[in-house]
Image (tube, rainbow, N blue to C red):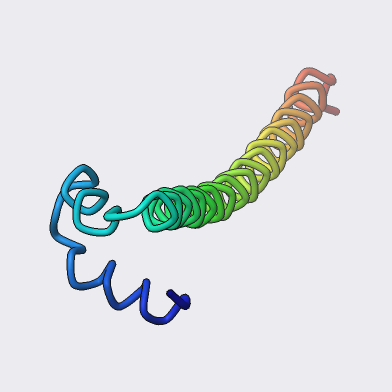
């Protein structure tokens, strides 16, 4: 059985449980091995897709966190500058006036 035939057979039974799929596709030992190998390969592909999505989401979250940290630092810097200005003004207000 070639790959195309096997994929067609699998798609025909796609809605069935794994147990039912193996029962239909495993009349002989070789067919059973093919069915199990196909299911393992398919599960690995699904895992790889899920991992890619999670890695992409992780990269987006890391970028967002980095941007948020940068904005926090900018806000702290702006606050520090404002405090310095106010402190200078307070110091100049305390000086005696002529």
Q: Classify residue 95 as left or right of residue 10.
A: right
Q: In this view, does 12 lie above or below 66?
A: below
Q: Where is residue 84 in the image (x, y as percent from the top left)?
A: 78, 30
Q: Is residue 41 left or right of residue 72?
A: left
Q: Residue at x 60, y 41 (%)?
A: 65
Q: Does residue 13 appear left or right of residue 33 in this picture?
A: left
Up the image or down, 93 lies above or below 71; here it is: above
In this picture, is 8 found above or below 43? below
Specify the quadrant of the image occupied by residue 74: top right
Name the spot of residue 13 as percent of width and height, x first: 18, 64
Residue at point 16% right, 49% down? 20
Image coordinates of residue 67 in percent, x first then y, are 64, 48
Question: Could you say which is closer to the camera, residue 81 or residue 34?
Answer: 34
Q: Picture coordinates of residue 80 (x, y %)?
A: 74, 31
Above or below, 58 against 85 in this view is below
Q: Nearer the viewer, residue 51 or 93?
A: 51
Q: Quadrant of the C terminus?
A: top right
What residue is rendered at 40% in x and 49% in y?
29
In the rendered image, the residue lying farthest to the front is 28
Q: Which of 11 and 67 is in front in this view?
A: 11
Who is closer to the viewer here, 97 or 13? 13
Which quarter of the picture shows residue 58? Answer: top right
Quadrant where the N terminus is found in the figure: bottom left
Q: Residue at x 70, y 44 (%)?
A: 70
Marks counted in the figure total 0
Q: Which residue lies furthest to the bottom in this view?
A: 4
């Amino acid at each position: 059985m070639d790959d195309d035939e096997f994929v067609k057979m699998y798609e025909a039974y796609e809605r069935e449980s794994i147990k039912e799929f193996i029962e239909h596709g495993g009349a002989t030992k070789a067919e059973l091995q093919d069915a199990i190998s196909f299911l393992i390969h398919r599960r690995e592909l699904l895992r790889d897709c899920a991992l890619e999505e999670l890695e992409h989401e992780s990269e987006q979250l890391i970028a967002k966190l980095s941007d948020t940290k940068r904005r926090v630092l900018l806000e702290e810097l702006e606050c520090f500058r404002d405090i310095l200005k106010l402190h200078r003004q307070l110091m100049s207000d305390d000086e005696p006036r002529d």
